[in-house]
Image (tube, rainbow, N blue to C red):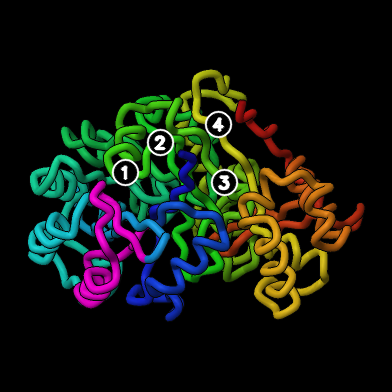
């Protein structure tokens, strides 16, 4: 069966996260979005884990259910430790096959930091040791480096990361079968890194509020089982891992270089011209994802796509509707139009990718239909994000808008 999986998100027990990130609301929004399997997030937090244990039921195949919605036990941890003369800050995603395994993982991790302090705990534990200890608990677990290009808290991060998988994970790199590309990069950017040929590239929302679920996701064709989904990643099985759903990477908040305090947004070329220094205040710029990929890449742009998992760039439906209606995402007018359309046509992903536009036109306004058409064809205008500021994406507008950012062609799915 076709499975849409979003495996990285946070519960209401994580900092800066909506109080609506509970089991009931997650299940409701997954149905609206069209997400088949969603991560629980934060299984390391004792109170959230107690709630999961009370509300979820095992499906007998490594997943858990709340009504018709399937959940995979997942969590993100923040590993902060000195290595090689620098303080490293790496976020890693953990996936587990059962609550019993989660209990054993938590018993180990509690030795390295307070699990109660935050849904995403901070651990004084090197990344290689994290993998070693988790895999000793159960070889059916998986560790996935999170949003690997963000300047802070990531594998390749310019401020506190490493230059390679091996440098970060040592011999335990053999257990790393997938990396999460993050909102500020997409597959073609990652294809430039030769060592990533040996792992799967996955995409998840990292949602902190329900409406952000599915802004990035993974699409599989396999049985609704924990082992089937992880097996597709471990074996790099393109017959079962069909494609990823992606942000336009320029919309991510670390795509370009810059300095938020001075409203400075710079391309890699401009950063080099300024020698990495903010032209306004003279302090170092935050080096973004595009520059970091350029620094580590052993290949030029335009790497052949043959043999790689395809991808689709999408814009969340509420954002398309908000621009079409001249208002903000989440407003009552947008939410009303959104609920009407997804109720008529099944779910948000069906509207964004599958339903013919003439059928969509029977249920919504012409300007929304035109926005969908332009999004499907990649006709968007973007001011890239930088230094923690999300990029600004526009579908409608004329010459007065910012120049269009060149986009790679959409990869064919068939």
Q: Is residue 192 left or right of residue 58?
A: right
Secondary element under disc 3, as helix, strand or loop, is: strand
Q: Say what secondary structure mark 2 lies in.
A: loop
Q: Are marks 4 and 2 in contact (CB under 8 Å)?
A: no
Sequence-wise, the earlier of marks 4 and 1 is 1
Residue matched to label 4: 310
- Of labels 1 and 3, earlier in sequence is 1
- Would residue 283 be seen by someone viewing this image from the given angle? no
Q: Which mark is residue 222?
A: 2
Q: Is residue 3 left or right of residue 165?
A: right
Front-most of residues 100 and 289: 100
Q: Nearer the viewer, residue 232 or 396?
A: 232
Query: CB of mark 4 within 8 Å of CB of mark 1?
Result: no
Name the element at disc 1: loop
Quadrant in which the C terminus is drawn? top right
> Picture quarter containing residue 277?
bottom right
Q: Which residue is mark 3?
A: 246
């Amino acid at each position: 069966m076709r499975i849409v999986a979003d495996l990285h998100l946070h519960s209401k027990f994580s900092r800066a996260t909506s109080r609506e990130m509970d089991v009931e609301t997650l299940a409701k929004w997954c149905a609206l979005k069209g997400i088949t399997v969603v991560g629980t997030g934060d299984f390391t937090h004792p109170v959230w884990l107690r709630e999961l244990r009370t509300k979820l039921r095992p499906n007998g195949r490594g997943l858990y259910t709340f009504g018709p919605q399937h959940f995979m036990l997942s969590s993100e941890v923040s590993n902060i430790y000195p290595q090689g003369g620098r303080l490293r800050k790496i976020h890693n995603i953990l996936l587990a096959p059962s609550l019993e395994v989660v209990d054993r993982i938590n018993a180990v991790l509690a030795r390295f930091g307070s699990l109660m302090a935050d849904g995403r705990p901070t651990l004084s534990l090197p990344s290689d040791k994290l993998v070693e200890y988790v895999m000793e608990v159960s070889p059916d677990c998986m560790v996935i480096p999170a949003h690997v290009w963000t300047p802070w808290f990531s594998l390749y991060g310019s401020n506190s990361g490493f230059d390679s998988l091996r440098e970060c994970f040592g011999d335990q790199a053999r257990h790393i079968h997938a990396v999460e590309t993050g909102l500020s990069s997409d597959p073609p950017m990652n294809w430039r890194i030769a060592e990533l040929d040996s792992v799967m590239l996955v995409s998840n929302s990292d949602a902190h509020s329900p409406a952000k679920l599915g802004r990035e996701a993974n699409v599989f064709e396999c049985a609704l089982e924990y082992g089937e989904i992880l097996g597709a990643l471990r074996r790099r099985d393109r017959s079962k891992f069909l494609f990823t759903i992606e942000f336009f990477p320029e919309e991510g908040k670390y795509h370009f270089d810059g300095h938020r305090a001075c409203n400075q947004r710079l391309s890699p070329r401009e950063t080099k011209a300024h020698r990495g220094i903010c032209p306004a205040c003279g302090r170092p710029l935050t080096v973004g994802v595009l520059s970091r990929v350029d620094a580590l890449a052993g290949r030029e742009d335009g790497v052949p796509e043959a043999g790689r998992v395809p991808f689709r760039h999408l814009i969340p439906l509420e954002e398309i509707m908000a621009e079409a209606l001249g208002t903000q995402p989440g407003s009552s007018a947008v939410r009303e139009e959104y609920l009407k359309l997804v109720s008529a046509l099944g779910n948000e992903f069906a509207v964004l990718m599958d339903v013919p536009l003439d059928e969509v036109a029977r249920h919504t306004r012409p300007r929304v239909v035109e926005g969908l058409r332009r999004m499907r064809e990649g006709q968007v205008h973007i001011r890239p994000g930088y230094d923690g500021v999300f990029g600004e994406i526009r579908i409608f507008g004329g010459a007065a808008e910012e120049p269009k950012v060149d986009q790679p062609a959409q990869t064919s799915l068939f």
